[in-house]
Image: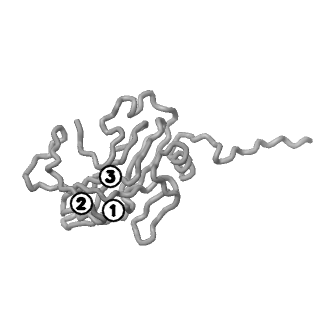
Amino acid sequence: MTPQTQTKPMANDAAPFAPGVLCDRQIRDLARREGMIEPFVETQKREGMISYGLSSYGYDARISDEFMIFTNVDSAVVDPKNFSSKSFVERKTDVCIIPPNSFVLSRTVEYFRIPKDVLVVCLGKSTYARCGLIVNVTPLEPGWEGHVTLEVSNTTPLPAKVYANEGISQFLFFKGSDACEVTYADRAGKYQGQRGVTLPRL
């Protein structure tokens, strides 16, 4: 009996991306081919710092040294439809002190370019979460690009430190079953191509 010919499995680098969460190899490939993350760190950096870089199923982004610290010195009302920059004090520093029960806005060091068949979800790193610091970012939609504006809340009654140019949050990349019909770029989203820390817009 003639043995059946076995089909040689496709090499990992040539395999198409199936729907689901992307692994390290796939994230690396998109970073190289499409500039999805720039600058891109291919391995986890953690010695003496809060870790950042490529992980098994995500990417740990860094927070920049640009901070806008919330203050109520003028007794302003926070209005998302008419937001005043006077509600913040700007600082450029390696270590930001967030006042008790307050928050800061900053941005990622990395610039993201999201493919039109990928959705990205951001989660805060556990090191900060265990200190009562919560990172809030809405999903990065297909076709969006820019620095990610980060909101870091200090939920404790004590001042809290955030370290610039170190890890702040993990981004998870989900590939859809198909590319969407209308991307964030197609509909000219108001936060498209943002650089630096970006305040609310209507």
Q: Which label belongs to residue 154?
A: 2
Query: Disc 3 and disc 2: Cα gap in Å?
Result: 16 Å
Q: Badge 3, how many Cα within 10 Å: few under 14, some, many 20+?
A: many
**Which residue is nearer to you in this view: 143 or 171?**
143
Quadrant for residue 139, please give it.
top left
- The tag earlier along the polypeptide, 3 or 2, is 3
Q: Position of residue 100 (x, y in %)?
A: 18, 63
Query: Disc 1 and disc 2: Cα gap in Å?
Result: 16 Å
- Point 18% across, 65% down: residue: 157
- The tag earlier along the polypeptide, 1 or 2, is 2
Q: Is residue 62 left or right of residue 81?
A: right
Q: Secondary structure at mark 3?
A: strand
From what the image shows, is residue 1 above or below residue 46?
above
Query: Disc 3 and disc 1: Cα gap in Å?
Result: 10 Å
Tag 3 residue: 107
Mark 2: which amino acid?
Asn
Q: State which quarter of the image contains the C terminus.
A: top left
Q: Is residue 72 left or right of residue 53?
A: left
- Point 38% across, 34% down: residue: 184
Q: State which quarter of the image contains the N terminus.
A: top right
- Point 15% across, 39% down: residue: 82
* Whether label 3 touches label 1, CB < 8 Å: no
- The tag earlier along the polypeptide, 3 or 1, is 3
From what the image shows, is residue 75 above or below residue 96?
above
Q: Is residue 82 left or right of residue 42?
A: left
Tag 1 residue: 164
